[in-house]
Amino acid sequence: MTVRTGRHFLQIPGPTNVPDRVLRAMAAPTIDHRGPEFAALTRRLLDALGPVFGTTGPVVVYPASGTGAWEAALVNTLSPGDRVLCFETGHFASLWRAMARSLGLDVEFVPGDWRHGASPEAALARLSADTEHRVKAVCVVHNETSTGVTSRVPEIRAAIDAADHPALLLVDTVSSLGSLEYRHDAWGVDVTVTGSQKGLMLPPGLSFNAVSEKALSAARTARLPKSFWDWTPIIDANEAGYFPYTPATNLLYGLEEALDMLADEGLEQVWARHARHAAATRSAVRGWGLDVLCADEREHSGSLTAVLLPDGQDADAVRKVVLERFDMSLGTGLGRLAGQVFRIGHLGHFNDLTLAGTLAGVQMGLELAGVPVGHQGLADALDHLRTT
Ligand code: PLP
């Protein structure tokens, strides 16, 4: 048996490292979810959640993973046969599209190369051509966790407006909320989908929909079958501080602690911290002579970096040696990127030395796996951290 010392480095792009404060908060005794103490907790949580999404509207909390919140966004707003416009930005956008299809929606999928975000130009062209307004929703993955590419959501909103199109805008922020700049109300988003296990620094198990007035009104006529995911009974029960089912009480304790941590740091500082660590990571990748998968300077992700290996090199062999030698987990290449990329998560509970340790492990792993990278990458990243 290998005895591990020190902490495991969980540098996949989620689940992320859960702060000790959050772990301790979750270790409190479970309380009666129909009692007054719980109602007070729910009210505090719903008040604290709005600012993180940038909304004054309702936020619905589910005891489910992000996939559940994807489904909730679709089934609450749409009817069988409705057309939705999706963009092939990567693995998660492809999974959301597959879900939409399996729910009986008619998906128009704008093809992509998995190195760019959703194209505002394509959105404008497709929506302008849709003079009968058959497209009922535009679905965008804000931060593609499989590629490290961040779509320009405000520009997609501007394209919908320029086409004078009434479609709803549904945005997946599973790997961006609480890490990257995001503004549900100001950006005109109708449903924001997220999960607990990344920027919110919790274990997996909670997911969320932030809902606009327009989405609430679409929900009144939407006919896709739903029961558990139905917003209405949840929003109604939340008024009194409760849920229509047994909530994930201890995860909610952790959520309160994590929201306190984000508020203490300040969201703008949280976003700046992630942007700076992402820039330092990219300078390491360039110093190693490797390519960042994201091909557009405007779309680099602040929460993760996907590193493309030269032909003939196996990204999973690098991950394997990094895990075995240095007890660090890196993200694997998903879908068609399998073996070609590994992903460095630099989001959530994270600081300069966590990044320095992470990049040191990556550099040593690359060398041990036979990828000729030299030492410049780590040196450049440390320079970036020292001087910015
Ligand atoms: N969307 C994105 C961007 C994700 O990164 C993930 C998971 O990593 C999901 C959706 C699915 O979330 P979950 O795995 O929590 O169901």
Image (cartoon, rainbow, N blue to C red):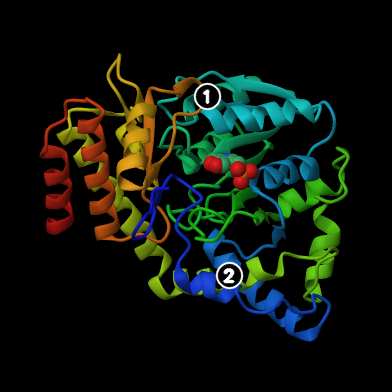
Nearest to the observer: residue 240 or residue 54 = 240
Q: How busy is the neighbourhood of tag 1: few (under 14 within 10 Å), some, or many (20 plus)?
A: few
Q: From this viewpoint, which residue is outermost toward the front?
A: 1
Q: From this viewpoint, which residue is outermost toward the top?
A: 312
Res 380 label: none
CA gap, disc 2 to disc 1? 32 Å
The residue beneath circle 2 is 254
SS at badge 2: helix
Res. 324 in view: yes
337 relative to 109 in the view: left or right: left
Amino acid type at mark 1: Gly
Give percent across and percent down for residue 144.
48, 36
- Quadrant where the C terminus is found in the figure: bottom left
**Which residue is located at x 40 percent, y 26 percent?**
115
Q: Earlier in the sequence, mark 2 or mark 1?
A: 2
Nearest to the observer: residue 303 or residue 328 = 328
Give percent across and percent down for residue 226.
86, 44
Nearest to the observer: residue 6 or residue 235 = 6
Res. 134 in view: no
> Is residue 377 depicted above or below 64 in this figure?
above
Asked where in the image residue 311 lies, by quadrant, the reply is top left
Nearest to the observer: residue 217 or residue 326 = 326
SS at badge 1: helix
**Which residue is located at x 32 percent, y 39 percent?**
322
Amino acid type at mark 2: Gly
Give percent across and percent down for residue 30.
72, 76
The residue beneath circle 1 is 335
Q: Whereabouts is ligand 1, in terms of quadrant?
A: top right
